Structure formats: structure tokens, C-alpha cells
Image (spheres, rainbow, N blue to C red):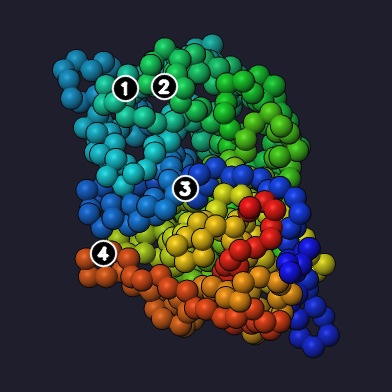
């Protein structure tokens, strides 16, 4: 007989206990986007990444084999981009000032890369090309849009990157109302193209909504003008500055709670008007933290962001960045970093239906768990639930699972020899690609349903419970 409530009780030490209760009786809390785990390639990296590198293509495609994803081309330099079609003669006036030129021949390479890797392109257009009256000068964007349609490439669009920082970075200011009008203009332009009249337009790609009332007002005023023009509201979130990052910051429980505070500010402003996307995010800004944000140390924040973000109603999360700087999924020499393996395992196990989870712990707990309906698998069939999360404590945490289920539980435990390792172990075995770049066997450990389980110190774990009685997963 199944219990009415699936309860995960974690004994912390000998006295305190933490209980997570998974809702078994109601429908899914949310159903997230199929491309929930997506990635970005910063515009500033376009001149250094090798898009024809077969290993990069292969690693990106491994991530899309289970679930699709976006590749967002954006970042601070997006507002310096000037498109120039070098595939034809007389392509119009050249760029001015310190523009970052993207040529048509390179754009073709970018499109070919996304096709090989089965990625969908999300392209961030330059918002700081302005007319004398302050309105957006769309002429260069239209050259790019027409060129993209000529290539017959389906892609989606964004306009500008972090307008709340324009004054600080570029000594320019675009009002929220003007940016909203510019988005409406772009929507009308896209509607003229058969290939893009149904393409989502998302924005306004703000840096930090909630840092002050001015940022909240900016988003509110933008949406008052542009709600009908955008299909999703995008904003960016990082936990701290990469230039001052420490190991303790990556593991401090209070760091993990920052995402919830900011997300609730954004979702309260947006309400039911639009989907909300975390359109650019990683552990720390300023290009990450050398030798910290590409190590196993950073994987706790990454998985927690995926679990907490979905539980808070975020529809899609774009990881900065797939390659380059100090926080990539794929290293500079085109090998998988720990967060790549975490993303792969998440995509393999975690389905789009979010199951409500409550707990009786405090905000500074070390064990943080989430639940979704599991992806269907030949191993466990349908109607399974996956509970996943992190233990950021430096000691093993024993816990009990009060669960009526099939006898077998499938476990995937990620650890590393040390926090600053660039490799990761699955159930005690180091994960490596095969010599041909293909995936190794991703095998579960199995155990029987008992009352006692454990999470090692500094570990990540997924438990899949077959044939659950969770109504949302039936």
C-alpha cells in the first residue's frame, strides 16, 4: 500500500532532523520548458571559439540528445555588435566606432554549428544603435534578420543586454518606456518575415532586478509597454563577484538563498502576464572565478539553481557559458567540466513536471532537495519520481526515506576527490568520455527501500523511485 505522502526524513546529527515532504495528491506545481537547461556563448567569445571543433559539437550534442536546448548569443558585448554581410558585394555602410563586427560568413558557421549540435539559436541584437530621437535604429538588425531567413534558420530573438547597466558601462541611458517601444518595433519587423513571425521575442535581459527600487520600476515600466511583444521575461542572476570569490562563498548556505529572494521579486512583478526565464546565469559574475567556478565546488550552486528555479516557477535557465571564461560547461581544451556532467545527468533523469516539496528546516540547512517526475526510462518505466539535491556539509549526512514504493531505488551519486577537482565521480567511478568522445555507461547503483540512506560530505545525489503514487506523475 502506498503512503499518502512521500516523506524524505534526514537525520542531521543525533538531535536535529530535517523532513522533506513531497506532495503525492496534487497535479504538478509547474511544467517547465523542454529547453529548461540551456546555455550561452558570450558574444565576446565569438572571435576565439572554434565552432568547427568536432569535440565541441559532440559535447554540445550529447546535452541535446535527451532534451533540446537553446544556445544564446549574448552578453555585454552584444550591444556593440554590427552585422556585415560579406557574402555579397555592396553590403551597405560599415560599422562605426568600436563595433564588434559579425560577418555573414561567420554567422553561417554559427548556424552550421547549431544545426550539427541540434541547438536552437537565441540571438541578442544590439540595442544601442540609436536614432537622433532616441529610438532604436533597426536598420542593421533588419539586414541580419533578412540574412538569417535566407539561410532558412529558425531562431529566436532578444534586444539588448542588461539595460539597467547601460549608464555604468556605456554612459548611455535608454528609458524603460523607450525600450518597450523598441521591442514592439522589433516584433512588428519580425512579423514581416514568414520564418520569424512566430519566433519568440524575449527580454529585457536585465542584470539584477531587485537590487534597488529603480530596477523594479524599470521592469514594471518596460512590461507596461511591451508585455504583448515578449513571449518571456528575461533577467540575469549571479551570486557574487568572481574577483572576490572564495571556497566559503560557494558553500555558504546563505549564498544558496539569494536566488529565491531575487526570483520572487521578478515573478511578483511579472505575475501571470509572461513566462519568466533566467536568461543568463552562473555562480559568479565578472567572467567567473579562476580555478573555482569550473570545478566540482561550483556544481552545488548549479544543481540547486536548477531545482530551486523550477520550484519557484522559472520556465527556462540559460547557463553562462557553454565555453570560455572561468565558468564554462566545456573547458578551454574542449573537455567536460563537472557542471557539464551535472547537466547531462539532470537532463537524463529529471522530467519537466515539477512536484511540490516542503520542508521543516531552516534557511541555512546544508541538505537541499527537490522533486520532479522522472523522465521515462526502460529501467524504471513511467510514473517514477526523482528526488535530487546537494549536501554542502563537510560531513556525511544520514537520513531515512519513509516511502512505500517498489523494492528497488536507483541512485546516482556525484562526488569528487577534492572540491577543486575538474573531474567528477559517479557512484565512485571517475566519469570520462570514451576515446571517440562518446559517453561512458551512465549506470545507477541500486538499493532496496529501507529507512536509512546517506549522503557523503560535499555530494550531489539523485534517487529515482519507480511506480510512485505521486498524482502529478501518473
Q: Position of residue 444 (x, y in %)?
A: 47, 74
- Check contact, mark 1 vs mark 3: CB within 8 A: no
Residue placed at 28% from the left, 64% from the top?
Answer: 438
Q: Which residue is mark 4?
A: 437
Q: Which residue is mark 3?
A: 38
In the depicted structure, whether residue 19 falls above or below residue 95: below
Pick the front one: 413 or 104: 413
Question: Marks 1 and 4, how far apart in space?
Answer: 33 Å
Distance Cα–Cα, label 3 vs label 2: 21 Å
Whole-Å distance between the Cαs marked 4 and 3?
Answer: 21 Å
Whole-percent x and y of residue 19? 78, 71
Crowd band around label 3 with a 10 angstrom C-alpha radius: few (<14), some (14–19), many (20+): many
The N terminus: image quadrant: bottom right
Task: Give the farthest residue toward the left.
Answer: 89
Could you say which disc has been placed on residue 196 in the image? 2
Q: Nearer the viewer, residue 418 or 457?
A: 457
Amino acid at each position: 500500500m502506498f503512503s499518502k505522502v512521500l516523506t524524505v526524513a534526514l537525520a542531521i546529527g543525533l538531535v536535529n532532523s530535517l523532513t522533506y515532504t513531497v506532495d503525492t495528491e496534487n497535479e504538478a506545481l509547474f511544467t517547465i520548458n523542454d529547453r529548461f537547461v540551456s546555455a550561452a556563448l558570450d558574444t565576446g567569445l565569438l572571435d576565439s571559439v572554434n565552432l568547427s571543433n568536432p569535440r565541441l559539437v559532440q559535447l554540445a550534442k550529447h546535452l541535446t540528445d535527451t532534451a533540446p536546448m537553446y544556445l544564446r548569443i549574448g552578453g555585454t558585448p552584444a550591444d556593440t555588435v554590427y552585422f556585415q554581410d560579406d557574402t555579397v558585394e555592396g553590403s551597405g555602410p560599415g560599422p562605426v566606432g568600436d563595433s564588434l563586427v559579425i560577418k555573414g560568413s561567420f554567422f553561417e558557421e554559427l548556424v552550421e554549428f547549431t544545426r550539427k549540435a541540434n541547438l536552437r539559436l537565441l540571438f541578442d541584437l544590439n540595442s544601442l544603435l540609436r536614432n537622433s530621437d532616441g529610438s532604436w535604429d533597426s536598420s542593421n538588425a533588419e539586414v541580419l534578420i533578412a540574412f538569417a531567413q535566407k539561410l532558412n534558420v529558425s531562431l529566436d530573438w532578444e534586444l539588448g543586454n542588461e539595460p539597467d547597466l547601460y549608464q555604468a558601462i556605456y554612459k548611455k541611458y535608454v528609458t524603460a518606456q523607450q525600450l518597450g517601444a523598441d521591442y514592439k518595433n522589433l516584433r512588428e519587423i519580425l512579423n514581416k518575415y514568414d520564418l520569424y513571425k512566430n519566433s519568440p521575442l524575449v527580454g529585457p535581459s536585465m542584470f539584477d532586478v531587485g537590487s534597488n527600487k529603480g530596477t523594479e520600476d524599470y521592469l514594471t515600466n518596460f512590461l507596461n509597454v511591451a508585455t504583448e511583444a515578449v513571449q518571456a521575461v528575461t533577467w540575469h542572476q549571479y551570486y557574487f563577484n568572481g574577483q572576490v570569490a572564495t571556497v566559503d562563498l560557494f558553500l555558504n548556505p546563505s549564498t544558496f538563498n539569494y536566488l529565491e529572494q531575487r526570483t520572487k521579486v521578478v515573478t511578483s512583478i511579472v505575475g501571470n502576464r509572461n513566462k519568466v526565464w533566467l536568461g543568463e546565469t552562473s555562480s559568479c559574475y565578472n567572467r567567473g572565478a579562476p580555478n573555482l567556478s569550473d570545478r566540482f565546488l561550483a556544481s552545488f550552486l548549479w544543481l540547486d539553481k536548477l531545482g530551486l528555479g523550477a520550484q519557484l516557477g522559472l520556465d527556462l535557465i540559460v547557463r553562462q557559458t557553454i565555453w570560455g571564461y572561468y565558468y564554462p560547461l566545456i573547458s578551454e581544451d574542449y573537455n567536460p567540466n563537472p557542471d557539464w556532467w551535472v547537466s547531462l545527468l539532470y537532463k537524463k533523469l529529471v522530467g519537466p513536471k515539477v512536484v511540490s516539496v516542503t520542508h521543516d528546516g531552516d534557511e541555512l540547512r546544508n541538505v537541499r532537495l527537490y522533486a520532479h517526475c522522472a523522465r521515462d526510462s526502460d529501467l524504471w518505466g513511467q510514473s517514477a519520481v526523482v528526488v535530487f539535491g546537494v549536501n554542502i556539509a563537510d560531513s556525511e549526512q544520514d537520513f531515512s526515506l519513509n516511502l512505500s514504493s517498489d523494492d528497488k531505488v536507483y541512485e546516482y551519486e556525484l562526488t569528487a576527490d577534492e572540491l577543486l577537482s575538474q573531474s567528477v565521480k559517479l557512484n565512485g567511478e571517475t566519469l570520462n568520455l570514451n576515446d571517440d568522445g562518446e559517453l561512458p555507461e551512465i549506470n545507477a547503483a541500486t538499493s532496496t527501500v529501507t529507512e536509512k540512506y546517506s549522503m557523503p560530505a560535499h555530494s550531489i545525489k539523485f534517487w529515482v523511485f519507480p511506480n510512485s503514487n505521486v498524482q502529478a506523475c501518473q
